[in-house]
Image (cartoon, grey):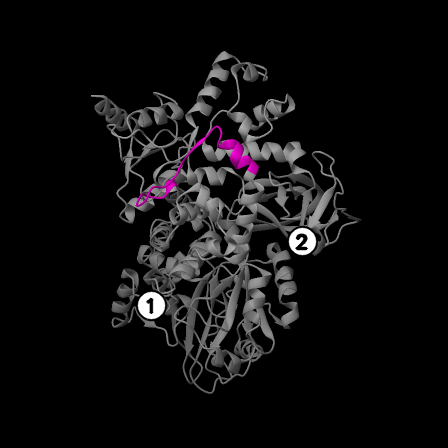
Amino acid sequence: MSGSLTLDSRRHQSDRIIEGKIIEGRIMSKDKESRAQGGKPLRSLTELEIAAMDAAALETEIRRHNRLYWEDNAPEIADYDYDRLTRRLRELAPDSPVLQEIGGAKPTVAEEALEAAVAAGEAVEHDPPMLSLDKCYSEKELGSWAGKIEGDFMATPKMDGVAAAIRYDARGRLSLAATRGSGRVGENITGNVRRIKDVPQTIRGASGPVEVRGEVYMRLSTFAKFRDQFSNPRNLTAGAIKQKEADKSAAYNLSFAAYDLVGGGVATEEDKFEFLKEAGFPEIERRLVKREDLQKTYEEFAARRGEFDFEIDGVVFKANRVDVQDEMGVTGHHPRCAIAYKFQGDSATTILKDIEWSVSRTGAITPVALIEPVELSGAMVSRASLHNAGFIEKLDLTRGATVMVTRRGGVIPNVEFVVAPGHEPFTIPSQCPSCQSPTQVRDDFLFCARPAECPDAVIGTLSHFVSVCEIEGFGEKSLRDALKKGILRSPVDLFALTKENLLLLERAGEKTADNLLRQVEEHRRLPLSVFLRALGIPELGHSVSDALVREFRTLARVRSLTREEISAVHSFGDIMAGKIVTGLKECSDLIDQLLQHVTVIERPEGAAAEGERAGGAGAGEAGGALAGQSFVFTGGLDSMTRSEAQKRVRALGGETPPGVSRTLTYLVCGKEDSGRKSSKQTKAESLIASGAPLKLLTESEFLELLKRGKQ
């Protein structure tokens, strides 16, 4: 249930676009909706992608996803990832106009149309506005919010429906009903609401005009007969409640859940629900909760998600006392007294069969849950993340336990909490599952005591190095074979490979060996930011390494940095700075050995950062026909391999950076096996929309550039 006030702003801004599309009573069928969405699965945004965006890029991305969601009915990312984008923008630019638009502070075209309709009686102004709810996704965030509130809390399931307000006059007669719309202005739906059986035409107990706010929704049992025609009950509800003819709206057998009251002189949320019950509205499930029971209540609702006869996407918590609510006030976007603790994706309960342990390149030993297969977001899932060894103890996981599993962002399955305990406790391994060395516990994490000798850790290090440097051809199977035969044990060994070595590998013929050697030779020149990332220091990701290169320019300077110097860089905390300094010292021998084989391209005074101008294959030769131009490739090319294309670019003086950035000149788009745009193309289009001088090239256009460059 939207619990206290309303659904999140993104869904409600979706409502007002839908209002425009269904103004003549049209409802989008499942077939039309699937065509609008293109049948594409939602993609998940990585921390790296979000961290790499500045405020301008975030604004562009948020506006683009808003357009995809509201206008095109073709979302690319889940609500969880959308919220991560807006949170990051709020951190970087709290006064961004995009945040004001989301909060309803700036009228949109759809809102202006509704405001114009107020005078004609077709739309209704909300006073007070129907604000959105603030959102959280973790127990820590919930606790931080609750710590500012005095007294108990009211908890209700957050229904995924269409928010509406119903007004009753001083004699208790239904006089007006409207959708939430923009939050300030909604569409008049009085005639249709009168036909909803859950809505009383008159109410008892009111001493003056009151307004009842709640959710128009369709029960899942009702939706069952429309399932073949429509993809979900919420979209069908949004169309049905806005039908021009009340008889057509009534035919969909909509329901209404009342959860808020404006007026009535009540002192608590519990009083509101008692008033609504006496007034004739159906009761909704609710809990009066003490602060220490908030997380437990959330978990109980989440575990019962499949039992409700309506869709929910979280739990709403609200201060129970109205005087506390009034004292806390509101922001331009949401009331401070309420929050929606949202599910992070499609969820289901299943049985935990066992735990598997895997070793990363850092020597961290990570648990993975093996579960009874369960369908989440249209896919069968049999494995789920458990984060770290401490998580097992925190959740008191046991073999055979019933657990709640969520597919966050529609992609990564995670075990969230235990619904019912199992029969056998799990033990934390005392030996590394890869090399049988002793294990060490550091905080909540388990580590192999000798990662330099651990096969899985070594393979992880090698895989990371070739991936970051874009040295193609070295898959995990070939790396394991090379490790087993003593050919590779460190990234340094890559640059000492011989053809004789490579021919010892399984299924490695003359051509394969030659290709691998050519790949290594092409990557003996590495931009500083790429070199730093390839070391495998966890804190040295893309944005951090680029920032260090921009600030300090040379490898020698970076290696000499103190914790204080690094933490002085914008957005770098003291803890991160300390880990970077420690990581660089621990990699000192590896750096020295690599420098005997690799030339690091440093940043000259006034030049762009290495990660922005040149990548894994190195910079081009000065004075060539493509000098000053950079090329990134996505998809497959018919005329040559990607490495061959990069080599031809560099031969003409061009650069081949590892990824798409604002300073890139061209993205060459080959064929995508999936038939969908790659993440590189999506990012490039976003940058172009924000004004970046970047161009997309087809393979034929790229070949024409090469041809002209040779002339």
Which quadrant is home to the C terminus? Answer: top left
As for residue 595 lying within the magenta part, the answer is yes
**Nearer the observer, 230 or 53:** 53
From the top left corner, tell me how far across and down residue 13 is, in percent.
Answer: 37, 60
Mark 2 in CB contact with mark 1 (< 8 angstroms):
no
Residue where numbered disc 1 is placed: 105
Name the mark nearer the viewer: 2 or 1: 2
Mark identifier at residue 32: none
Q: Which residues are magenta?
A: 589-610
As for residue 17 lying within the magenta part, the answer is no
Residue where numbered disc 2 is placed: 443
From the top left corner, tell me how far across and down residue 54 is, in percent.
Answer: 37, 53
Amino acid type at circle 2 is Asp
At 37% from the left edge and 76% from the top edge, which residue is drawn? 127
Residue 254 left/right relative to 641: right
| Most distant residue in the bottom direction | 207
Can residue 65 be seen?
A: yes
Q: Is residue 710 above or below residue 527?
A: above
Q: Earlier in the sequence, mark 2 or mark 1?
A: 1
Q: Real-space Cα distance between discs 2 and 1? A: 45 Å
At 58% from the left edge and 69% from the top edge, which residue is drawn? 155
Amino acid type at circle 1 is Ala
Helix or strand or loop: what does disc 2 sit on?
Answer: loop
At 67% from the left edge and 53% from the top edge, which residue is drawn? 443
